[in-house]
């Protein structure tokens, strides 16, 4: 989320009811897709020569460390380019998702936006011609060298928006993301439970926490996307990585109704039935859940690296983070990738200044600022020295998964509507309203309708 987050954000959020017709018109594959903007435009990198410029920037970097890095970088950018004024509009992930679509199709679109990488957002905006392909500025600033292929795939689409993971870059991310497990070491010690090092030990720890009279897992799922991260974490341990990648990128030939995916869904249902989550998971929101964890009301929290700065501020040294411990004999695997990328809108009347801004907030100097503010840089990660404690845990987890394990895509990337479809289906799974087979059949129907279109 992410976020986040993001995100991850991190998952797609439903647009306003009034925008549903627009969504259908600009979904990848639609006959109404706009002609893509040109990729051979001339580029001006001498920003001082542009004269007075106001850049309107929409972001969702609202949490403590996220907001701090944006404030610092924006101030530094305006100091370097005094002719440019940044007009920042910072919104929560959910608020940004519900307003961005209407804004991009209106007459007063911002210059720079953070857009969810997934098909329902960035893919639809690309298909509608509402974002500029970044190739001209990538050549000028060397972004193709800054970002490895493993990162560029998360911000790349073909100009018609149909193929995710290939084609032009349409955004630049600042942060890397990894979904792992936060834990309260004091509570584990109180309950006499060792920090788990394998998936089998983790599930045994959940049972032991419950038997000890405490709540094993904090989850707030009223927005529906947090459960995708819980399911994804379980799925990453039980389903082959290539199957998950094919599903998440919406490739033909993959299926959600395999025995391995059914086992993953059954495991989440078993956790819910065993009382491993707090009560009322579908009735409280994500912020309430991580805040409850920060108060010691649960021992574990499955969530993304975007929570780290806030949790460390609330808990100090009494919170740690680890990648999901893998089953014996399997590599470490986790959901993750990039935070929401920053993109330039087609409506911007100052795209060169906007590109300079994107370059500035993703530079090597910017990566150091991100590190200092408790965020996880998506590039130059190994060159950073994070502070001891939770930040160091997060950096180590990202490196373990990205370098030596398997960093797997977010599941809502699969189709334009998968965030909503899977989110609602997992709410039914957690509440016991639908069994695993029915939940996966619902998800499969959404998937099949898209890949077989």
Image: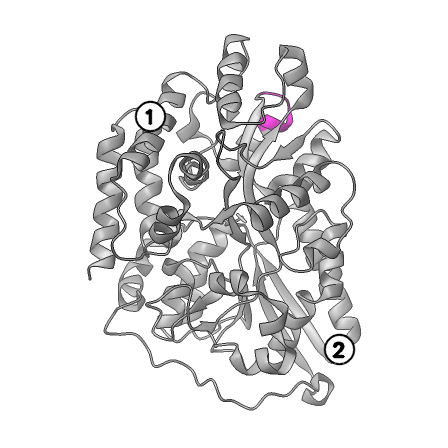
The first of marks 1 and 2 along the sequence is: 2
Q: Please tell me which residue is depicted at 53% across the width and 9% down the height of the picture.
A: 213
Place residue 394 in its image quadrant.
top right
Q: The magenta stretch spans which residues?
A: 292-297
Residue in front for this viewpoint, 298 or 75: 298
Place residue 301 in its image quadrant.
top right
Is residue 350 in sight in this rendering?
Answer: no
Cβ atoms at labels 1 and 2 below 8 Å apart: no
- Circle 2 SS class: loop
Residue 296 inside the magenta-drawn segment: yes
Place residue 130 in its image quadrant.
bottom left
Q: Please tell me which residue is depicted at 69% across the width and 59% down the height of the picture.
A: 380
The outermost residue toward the front is 329
Is residue 266 rendered to the left or right of residue 409?
Answer: left
Q: Which percent across, then down, holds residue 103?
A: 45, 66
Residue assigned mark 2: 81
In what quadrant of the picture does the C terminus appear? Answer: bottom left
Crowd class of label 2 (few under 14; some 14 to 19; many from 20; radius 10 Å) = some
Q: Which percent across, then down, holds residue 210?
A: 50, 13
Residue assigned mark 1: 431
Q: Please tell me which residue is depicted at 48% across the width and 36% down the height of the picture.
A: 330
Task: Give the colour scheme of this rendering.
Answer: one colour
- Up/down of 182 relative to 360, above or below: above
Q: Which percent across, then down, holds residue 67?
A: 67, 52
Q: Which percent across, then down, holds residue 31?
A: 23, 73
Q: Which is closer to the viewer, label 1 or label 2?
A: 1
- Circle 1 SS class: helix
Residue 256 inside the magenta-drawn segment: no
- Up/down of 31 relative to 173, above or below: below
């Amino acid at each position: 989320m992410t976020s986040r987050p993001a995100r991850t954000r991190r998952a797609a959020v439903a647009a306003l009811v009034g925008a549903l017709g627009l969504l259908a018109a600009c979904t990848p594959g639609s006959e109404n897709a706009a002609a893509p903007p040109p990729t051979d435009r001339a580029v001006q990198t001498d920003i001082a020569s542009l004269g007075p410029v106001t850049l309107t920037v929409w972001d969702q970097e609202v949490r403590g460390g996220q907001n701090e890095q944006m404030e610092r970088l924006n101030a530094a950018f305006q100091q370097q380019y005094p002719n440019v004024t940044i007009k920042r509009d910072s919104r929560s992930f959910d608020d940004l998702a519900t307003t961005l679509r209407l804004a991009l199709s209106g007459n007063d679109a911002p210059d720079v936006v953070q857009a969810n990488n997934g098909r329902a957002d960035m893919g639809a905006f690309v298909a509608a011609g509402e974002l500029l392909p970044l190739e001209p500025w990538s050549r000028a600033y060397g972004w193709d060298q800054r970002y490895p292929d493993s990162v560029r795939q998360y911000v790349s689409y073909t100009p018609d928006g149909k193929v995710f993971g290939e084609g032009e870059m349409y955004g630049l991310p600042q942060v890397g993301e990894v979904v792992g497990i936060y834990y309260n070491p004091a509570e584990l010690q109180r309950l006499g439970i060792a920090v788990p090092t394998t998936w089998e030990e983790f599930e045994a720890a959940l049972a032991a926490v419950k038997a000890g009279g405490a709540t094993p897992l904090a989850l707030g799922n009223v927005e529906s996307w947090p459960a995708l991260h819980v399911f994804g974490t379980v799925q990453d341990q039980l389903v082959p990585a290539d199957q998950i990648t094919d599903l998440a990128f919406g490739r033909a030939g993959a299926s959600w109704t395999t025995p391995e995916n059914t086992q993953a869904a059954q495991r989440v249902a078993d956790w819910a039935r065993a009382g491993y989550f707090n009560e009322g998971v579908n009735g409280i929101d994500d912020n309430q859940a991580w805040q409850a964890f920060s108060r010691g009301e649960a021992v574990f929290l499955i969530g993304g690296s975007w929570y780290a700065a806030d949790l460390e501020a609330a808990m100090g040294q009494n919170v740690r983070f680890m990648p999901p411990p893998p089953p014996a004999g399997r590599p470490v695997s986790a959901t993750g990738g990039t935070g929401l990328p920053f993109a330039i809108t087609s409506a911007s009347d100052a795209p060169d200044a906007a590109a300079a801004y994107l370059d500035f907030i993703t530079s090597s100097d910017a990566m150091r600022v991100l590190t200092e503010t408790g965020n996880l840089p998506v590039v130059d990660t190994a060159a950073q020295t994070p502070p001891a404690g939770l930040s160091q845990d997060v950096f180590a987890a990202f490196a373990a998964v990205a370098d030596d394990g398997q960093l797997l895509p977010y599941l809502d990337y699969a189709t334009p509507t998968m965030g909503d479809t899977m989110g609602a289906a997992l709410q039914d799974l957690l509440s016991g309203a639908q069994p695993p087979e029915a939940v996966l059949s619902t998800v499969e129907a959404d998937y099949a309708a898209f890949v077989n279109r």
